[in-house]
Amino acid sequence: RSRPAGSAASALLTVTMLGFAAGYRYELGLIVALFGFFIAFNLLEALLPSLASRSVPPTRRGLAMGVYNTAQSLGLFAGGAVGGLVAGYGDAALFLVCAALGLVWLGIAAFIRPPPRRQTA
């Protein structure tokens, strides 16, 4: 059930970005958006590495996790740098760009096949 959970978490993350863009100046809007963000973030934080490790043969699992962690670290750097540039265009610009990227990710995720079930020894 990781695919529906991952899609739901990605959709929630996209919706929360729109919530931040619309309601970041209001305390209640900020609280609701933060609550949704952390639910989605924590789900994806567990699901994505699991998907990466299950998508490859056991002999390549270490390599896959190394590539995943490298990509995650590069994303942290690039996300902060690009996010800082985008934030210069206005208060809500960054949240709107993140929501647009979330929609792109949902479109890509619709075509991802779940990894096959493996028999454990």
Image: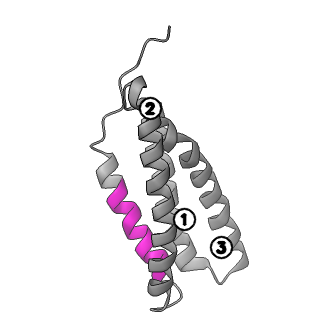
Front-most of residues 26 and 120? 120
Secondary element at tag 2: helix
Q: Label 3, on which residue?
A: 29
Residue 92 image label:
none
Instruction: Please name the residue shown 68% across and 81% down the image.
Output: 26
Which of marks 3 and 2 precedes in the sequence?
Answer: 3
Query: The disc labelled 2 sits on which kind of residue?
Result: Arg
Percent across and percent down for residue 9 are 51, 49
Q: Label 1, on which residue?
A: 16
Which of marks 2 and 1 precedes in the sequence?
Answer: 1
Q: List the single residue furthest toward the top.
A: 121
Percent across and percent down for residue 20 are 57, 74
Query: The disc labelled 3 sits on which kind of residue?
Result: Gly
The mark closer to the camera, 2 or 3, is 2
- Is 41 situated above or below 115? below
Q: Is residue 114 magenta?
A: no
Side of 117 where 12 appears, left or right: right
Instruction: Please name the residue shown 54% across and 65% down the image.
Output: 16
